[in-house]
Image (cartoon, grey):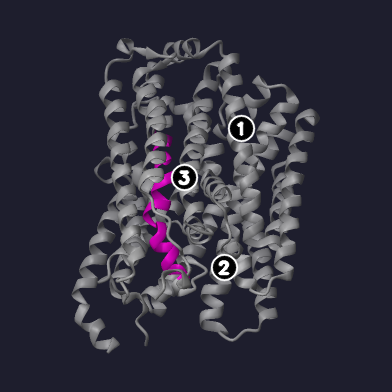
Amino acid sequence: MNWQALIPLIAVLLIIFGVGVWSGKYIKTSNNFMQDYFLGGRSLGGFVLAMTMTATYGSASSFIGGPGTAYTEGLGWVLLAMTQVSTGYFVLMVLGKKFAIVTRKYKALTMVDFLKKRYRSKWVVLISALSIIIFLFSAMAAQWIGGARLIESLVGIPYTTALFIFALFVLIYVTIGGFRAVALTDAIQGMIMFVGTLILLIATIIAGGGLSNIMEGLSAENPNLVTPYGAEGTLTPAFVSSFWILVGVGVVALPQITVRAMSYKDSRSMHRAIIIGTIVVGVIMLNMHLIGVLARPILPGIEVGDKVMPLIALEVLPKWLAGIVLAAPMAAIMSTVDSLLLLVSSSVVKDVYLNYVEPNASHRRVKRLSIGVTATLGIIVFLMALNPPDLIIWLNLFAFGGLEAAFIWPIVMGLYWEKGNKYGALASMVTGVGLYILSDSFFPQPFGMHSVVLPVVVAFFAYVIASLGTQEKVIGQET
Amino acid sequence: MKHENKDDSDPRYKVANREALFGVGLVIFNFIWWYAFAYGLGSKDPSEYTYVFGLPAWFFYSCVLGFVVMAVLVTIVVKKWFVEVPFDEEGDGK
């Protein structure tokens, strides 16, 4: 046990927990429960918005899996990770004001709400809700595994116990506090990540005897580690570039991100969030992955990639500081998990139940149901995570790709192209997801690119062709 | 059935469309910068690499400097060209 590291870590987590429970008070006195629980009352300021986007996005894939992979692949993986800087400005600029205005006009609370009012189709709603539930479930499981791994290697308790502690913690504050709790805790977690990775990077460089020294060590071990091509030379330009779609621009279609793009207060908050978000995402991504690479000459021979972060922190920092810094990846995981949990829960309650099962449910019933569903979902994910696969990063990226293939065009074209209609949206979602799953299982890297690229391109044409082909049909129906 | 998203006359949409295009422009610029430095300087043999502040030049220009440039550009674009518009229905006097 590392008690010296553990006590600061627990203290940080307790503060986060406290904020979550405190913001639950708003919900109790609220007279618009749905809007408050799932959207924080559309009152987010610029700083909180930027932080909650960053924290939600900077998930276990970047914090645990990412540095681990960077440790194995070298600087090429940092290059790949830097494609994520674009999310900081691209998402808010492209969804931007149009999305904010339109979702207010529609009174939409979730991404599916938006699709429902834009396309007015039962099938669009059902397929969207279903994709969200399935894909985000696998993403969540991946995150929980990451969280538990971290506790496991830090504290030295068995995986199952670690998972249990982690799950209990997240469940309580999400269930009580809703979106506001999630956004506020994200803001704290974002700051911890920002400062924590900065401290760790500096300490790692000092421990390695300066950057030049570390780079020499790397090229002495394997010159490929300092090239953009990865340790085995397998990271081709086409493959790495396709991450601009997967973790860069494609992120506009992730429901956990779009829901944030409808939650801010005014234009000023949005402008500030774009600037702060870009800087924060960039700093965190660069530091985090660079730490993974620089750790290699200092701590050679780590076999489980997920353990690189905790081990290097314990190695180069004083124990108590390592505890605080390690709250960063912990924070990242928690903030991703809590957003996903809330989102899946909103899909079940708002998009499916209230739309098709019982539209006139009473206020109290909706409230109970929302909290109950959130808790139940958490427990199911916990059970799934008990028996986990080894590399979380791929699991996680699979979920991202699937959602992007499904939603990118129905959202973006739905906003900016008036002729887009429900047939286009359906065609796009079905071809996008279908092709992605087929491609991922049977021909993993078509044309040397990540398997998400082709489905996204094909889904675009499906959207346009199906929309244009059915123009008369739709006009006929609506007049 | 009411057709509420037909009101493209809403002047706020013009602002929104322009800003979305800024986003696309920035991302294209970002990609070119990132790609050109990474693979332009990085495709040499590692023994011929030059180093900047201890990092390989391709990495420094593509990832470190590239990020700083983007952060500055984004700040300039937002401060100079982004317009504040009200989001609520009442705000636009329709």
Percent of width and height locating residue A290: 49, 26
Name the disc covering residue A195, or none.
1
Could you give the CA–CA distance between mark 2 and mark 3, rounded to whole angstroms?
25 Å
Both labels 1 and 2 in a single chain: yes
Q: Which residue is mark 2?
A: A346
Name the disc covering residue A394, or none.
3
Give me the chain letter of mark 3: A
Q: N-terminal of the two: label 2 or label 3?
A: 2
**Local crowd size for mark 1, using a 10 Å CA cut-off: few (<14), some (14–19), many (≥20):** some
**Local crowd size for mark 3, using a 10 Å CA cut-off: few (<14), some (14–19), many (≥20):** some
A282 to A54, vertically: above or below: above
Magenta segment: A80-104
| Residue A144 shows in this picture | no
Three-letter amino acid code at the position of disc 3: Trp
> At x 34% / y 30%, what residue is drawn?
A234
A63 to B37, vertically: above or below: below
Q: Quadrant of residue A238?
A: top left
Nearer to us of marks 1 and 3 is: 1
